[in-house]
Every structure is written in structure tokens, then in C-alpha cells.
Image (tube, rainbow, N blue to C red):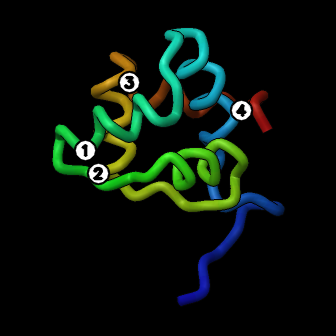
Amino acid sequence: MKFNKYNTSYNIVGKKLKEIRESKNISQEQLSNKLALLGITLYQSDIFNIEHNARTVRDFELWGICNILGIKAEDLFDPNSN
């Protein structure tokens, strides 16, 4: 399956996700483990690829990430982050 890109990125939330995750002192592995408790399989390598704009983000993954980080999806859509 071929995915469209925005400029050269597969997502526009990666940089902001990394910034927020690190500000809350949550590792990629910890985020992965917490997502698993919600029934969302997202490996540490998937989170790495999302944060480096090399992977798309599914809506339920975005919901889980926001739930765990205690943020709104809008918080990840920073027009100055790319």
C-alpha cells in the first residue's frame, strides 16, 4: 500500500510528540507498554518512526497516545514543528 506524504514526512505530529513525551519523562518503551494496556500494539520502533516522521499515525494510536500523555490531539498539530 502506498501512502501519501506531506512534503517528505508521513505525519506532521512526530516532532511535537517527541517534545511532549520527553517533557513528561516518558520513554518510548514506557509509552509502548502503556499503549499495550489500552490494547494498542505500537512497538518502541514504531514510536521512533512516528517521531522521526517515517511512519503514519492511525487514529486509534493517536487517541491512545493523547490519552496516556494527558493531552488533546490538537496539541500535537503545531504548525511550527516541521
Distance of mark 4 from mark 1, alpha carbons?
30 Å
Which residue type carries mark 3? Lys
Tag 4 residue: 79
Q: Nearer the viewer, mark 2 or mark 1?
A: 1
- Of the pair 78 and 66, the residue shown nearer to us: 66
Which residue type carries mark 2? Phe
Tag 3 residue: 72
Classify residue 31 by image quadrant.
top left
Q: Decide which of tag 4 and tag 2 comes sooner along the chain.
A: 2
Tag 1 residue: 36
Which residue type carries mark 1? Ala
Circle 4 SS class: loop
Q: Vertically, is 57 above or below 80?
A: below
Q: Nearer the viewer, mark 4 or mark 2?
A: 2
Which residue type carries mark 4? Pro
Crowding around mark 2 (Cα neighbors within 10 Å: few <14, some 14 to 19, many 20+) is few
Q: Does residue 79 appear to the left or right of 33 in the view shown? A: right
Distance of mark 4 from mark 2, alpha carbons?
22 Å
Tag 2 residue: 60
Q: Decide which of tag 4 and tag 1 comes sooner along the chain.
A: 1
Callouts 4 and 1 close, C-beta under 8 Å: no
Q: Does residue 81 appear to the left or right of 11 in the view shown? A: right
